[in-house]
Image: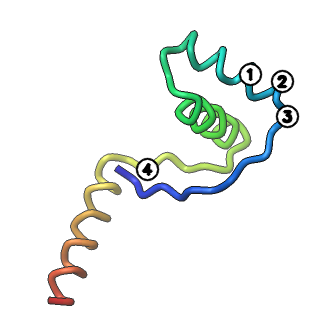
Amino acid sequence: MAEKKSFVLRIATEKMEAVEKWAADEFRSSNGQLEWIIDQALKKAGRYKVKSAKDTTDESIKKDEKNDNKS
């Protein structure tokens, strides 16, 4: 799983309530719903390249090798 960065979001109460309702309808947490909305918007705008399973595996191997070399 990719590392996640925490941040504070200021949002109008009405918008957050709409997100919470939508999340409940989709059986997601509010955080998961916001992440999904952002993911969809980034893909639609062509600003997010979806990594293949191979790319993810390669990155994991590189991280493991880097950690092994630190020891």
Question: Considering only order in the chain, which callout, 3 or 1, is on the residue closer to the N terminus?
Answer: 3
Q: Give the labeled residue for mark 2.
A: 14
Residue type beneath disc 3:
Ala
Whole-Å distance between the Cαs marked 2 and 1? 5 Å
Q: Nearer the viewer, residue 26 or 14?
A: 14
Q: Image point 18% across, 88% down: which residue?
A: 69
Label 1 SS = helix
Question: Considering only order in the chain, which callout, 1 or 4, is on the residue closer to the N terminus?
Answer: 1
Q: Give the labeled residue for mark 3.
A: 12
Q: Position of residue 23 (x, y in %)?
A: 59, 20
Q: Nearer the viewer, residue 44 or 33?
A: 33
Image marks 2 and 1: residues in contact by CB distance under 8 Å: yes
Residue type beneath disc 1:
Glu
Label 2 SS = helix
Image marks 3 and 2: residues in contact by CB distance under 8 Å: yes
Residue type beneath disc 4:
Lys
Quadrant of the snapshot with the C terminus = bottom left
Q: Position of residue 39 (x, y in %)?
A: 60, 39
Whole-Å distance between the Cαs marked 4 and 1? 32 Å
